[in-house]
Amino acid sequence: MDVLTAPLTLTVNGESLLLDGTPSVAALIAHLKLDTRKVAVELNREIVPRSTYATTTLKSGDVLEIVHFIGGG
């Protein structure tokens, strides 16, 4: 297996997730079928500004917490 294309192991909301390539936070949110306007992301205990989702790359071992806001009443 080529190191450059090895799957990444991430922890997302306490669960392991394998992803191929070098995804960004934006790519992960799209993979999870979430709306970037309705989520908050914490990467390794640091809040990721929404404006940097596309440029924040993920690496194996990263720990993310994603909060999805749902409207209602």
Image (cartoon, grey):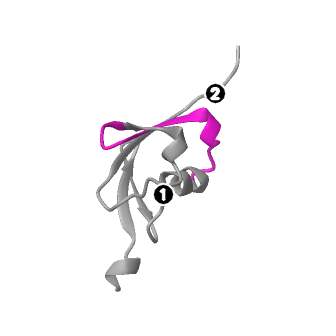
Could you tell me which quadrant the C terminus lies in?
A: top right
Could you tell me which quadrant the N terminus lies in?
A: bottom left
Q: Give SS at disc 1.
A: loop
- Kindly identify the residue that appears in the image at 70 percent across and 19 percent down: 72
- Kindly identify the residue that appears in the image at 45 percent across and 71 percent down: 21
Residue 73 shown left or right of residue 60 in the figure = right
According to the picture, the residue beneath numbered tag 2 turns out to be 70
How crowded pointer 1 is (Cα within 10 Å; few <14, some 14-19, many 20+) is rated as some
Residue 60 magenta-highlighted: no
Q: Residue 9: x and y, percent?
A: 35, 62
Residue 50, placed above or below residue 30: above
Residue 57, placed above or below residue 43: below
Badge 1 or badge 2: first in the primary sequence = 1
- Residue 37, disc: none
Q: Amino acid at mark 2?
A: Ile
Q: Which residues are magenta?
A: 32-46
- Kindly identify the residue that appears in the image at 64 percent across and 27 percent down: 70
- Toward the bottom, the furthest residue is 1
Q: Residue 34: x and y, percent?
A: 62, 44
Residue 7 occupies quadrant: bottom left
Residue 17 occupies quadrant: bottom left
According to the picture, the residue beneath numbered tag 1 turns out to be 24
Residue 42 magenta-highlighted: yes
Q: Residue 2: x and y, percent?
A: 35, 85
- Toward the top, the furthest residue is 73
Tell me the mark number nearer the camera, choosing from 1 and 2: 1
Q: Amino acid at mark 1?
A: Ser
